[in-house]
Every structure is written in structure tokens, then in C-alpha cells.
Amino acid sequence: MKVLFIDRTHPVLKEELVSMNFICEDLTDFPDKSFEELLPDYHGVVIRSKVTLDKPILDKARNLKFIARAGAGMESIDVEYAESHGIACIRAAEGNKDSVADHVLGMILSLFKKLHIADSEVKRGLWHRESNRGVELTGKTFGIIGCGFTGGEVAKRLSGFDVTVLGYDKYKKGFSDKNIIESTMERMCEEADIVSLHLPLTDETHFMVNDEFFSRFKKNIYLINTSRGKVVSTEDLVANLKSGKVLGACLDVLEYESASFERLKGLGMWTNNRGRDINKLGAWLMKKGVWKYRHPVQYLVKSENVVLSPHIAGWSFESYKKISMILADRIRELNLHP
């Protein structure tokens, strides 16, 4: 049986599949063909986020037995349609939970202690202490929305801090333990100082975090998003950052992320006073006052109360291998035979 690797994974996955007598081939082996043309010849496909496997494409994949997603999110796959046609859809949701949990703590501590600002200033020869006075995590109430693998790991990391951890999950009950208190959304809105999102992107969660969401919180809050960019409305987030309802944000993912951050050029992310789009020099020139705001992401880029990273929360050397090992085990459990 043949497996097509559309995206790059740790070599251990291919090694394990070969040991199961699969023939493994890469999309890069066929530079003159698209994956849609190749799919009918394969029994399995391994993807990350490069392609979308929707109904029209799946209809072409007549021999397909499984889709392996090297990660957690399945929004790029029409899972219901695939499974109705006997195609197993597998993922490795727990493979990067440790990496994401570490990243969450790193981002919020960087924001609270202004490390992202202080580091830049010291490297530029500036020694500003009072303006970099930080905030302590101790004594805060930390809200986790989505208490699966990653949310649980975040709670575990927080056990070393003197914080109250509240967890809300619409589809999970009875998960309170020594690290987390199962909460209603009402209680979280009443008590939370920090809210961390660990949700899949679905019709239900799309732009779930908007003006109405922020208005429900009694306190002014800090927001962390390491899940999916389109769970948060950037326009509404920026409005609430400006008003002070959101005191700061840690964002590993963005609504406008797409396949490449540079595609924001087409959205007019950075535009000069003559209306011309630019890209790589935009951030630097904007700081110099040459460029004006046009896109809400620009506010995030410039704000000192926002810490950004390029969708790397789950991107560690360790998770890279763990994800592939988990996928190999799950493919083995399918017990497929020619």
C-alpha cells in the first residue's frame, strides 16, 4: 500500500511505515504534478496544513484508506465526509501538548515582566528600569478554555505558581484535580485575570472571542491564544486593547495568518502615505513614523502590550518526533493490509 507525504514530518514516521510494508513517497518527488492528480494512486496521505481535503478532492481519492494529520487541528479536512466513505482520519493531538504548555507560560511571563521590551532596549544600549517594572503571576486567577491535552498541561505547569486555575470545557465534565478547578463560563467571567484559549477551529468557535465575549468579563483581562487564529476577531481584540478591557495579549496565531505571514501584504498590512503596499521593511519603517495604520494587525505588531510568535507554540524538536511516533502507532492500529 502506498502513502503520499504532502508535508514534511520527522523521518521516524516514514521509517515506521516502511517497516509496516508501506511504500512511502513524497509530493516533492513529483514536481510536475499536483497532489490532486496523485491522490487516486495512494492508500494513505500524511498532511500538516499545506492542503485542504474537501469533498471534491476526496471524491478523487478512490483508494484512500487513511488521512494522517501531523498535529491537532482537523479543520482542513472534511472529516465527516471522509469517514462516511471509509477513510480513517487520525491525528496526534497530544504530540505537542508539552511544547504548547511551555510556550503559554513563556509568553505570559514575558508579557508580565516586559522581557520582550527590556531585551530589545538593553541590546540597544538603554537601561530603563522603572518603565519596565513588571506584574507578578502570583495571586492571579488563570482561566483555561478548552481542557483537553494541552489545557491540562498548562494547568500542570501552573501548579508551581500561587495561582487559581479555572477550567471550562463545553464538551468535557468531571476533570477537576489538584491542578485545575472545573468551572462554569459564568464563574470564569466573574473571576479570571488571564484567559488562555485551547480550542479547535469549528463553526462554533469561529470568532468566538469578540466584543460580546470580552464584555462578559468583570475584570480587565489578559488574553493568550495558542490555538487557532480565527477563534479571535482581530478587529474586536484591537478595539478592546485600545479601551483597556484587554490589558495585554499573547498570540501565537493570528486571524490573518494564512500559509505565510507575508501574505498580509495583499491585505495592505503596511501601507505608506501614498497608499503603496510594502512588506519586509514595513515594521521597521512604521516604527520610524513613515507609515500609517491601515490593518488591525498593525496595532498588534506595534503594541508593547502584545507578544507575538509565528505559530510555533507546538514547534519543538521533541514534539516533532513525538507527533510522528503517535501517528505511526495509530496507523499500525488500523491494521491495514493490501
Image (tube, rainbow, N blue to C red):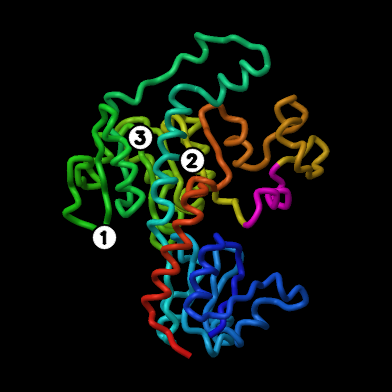
Q: Are marks 3 and 2 in contact (CB under 8 Å)?
A: no
The circle drawn on residue 194 is: 3
Disc 2 marks which residue?
A: 237
Disc 1 marks which residue?
A: 171
Residue 126 spot, x, y in % from top left: 63, 11
- What span is in magenta? 259-269
Dot 3: element? strand
Residue 8 spot, x, y in % from top left: 60, 62
Dot 2: element? helix
Lateral position of residue 32 relative to residue 301, left or right: right
Residue 145 spot, x, y in % from top left: 32, 48
> Which numbered disc, 3 or 1, marks the residue that appears first in the sequence?
1
Residue 140 to residue 328: above or below: above
Q: Quadrant of residue 225?
A: top left
Q: Are marks 2 and 1 in contact (CB under 8 Å)?
A: no
Disc 2 crowd rating (10 Å Cα; few below 14, some 14-19, many 20+) is many
Residue 78 spot, x, y in % from top left: 48, 75
> Which numbered disc, 2 or 1, marks the residue that appears first in the sequence?
1
Lateral position of residue 49 relative to residue 197, left or right: right
Q: Nearer the viewer, mark 2 or mark 1?
A: 1
Main secondary structure of the magenta stretch: helix
Seen at 49% across and 33% down, the residue is 241
Q: Nearer the viewer, mark 3 or mark 2?
A: 3
Residue type indicated by callout 1: Tyr
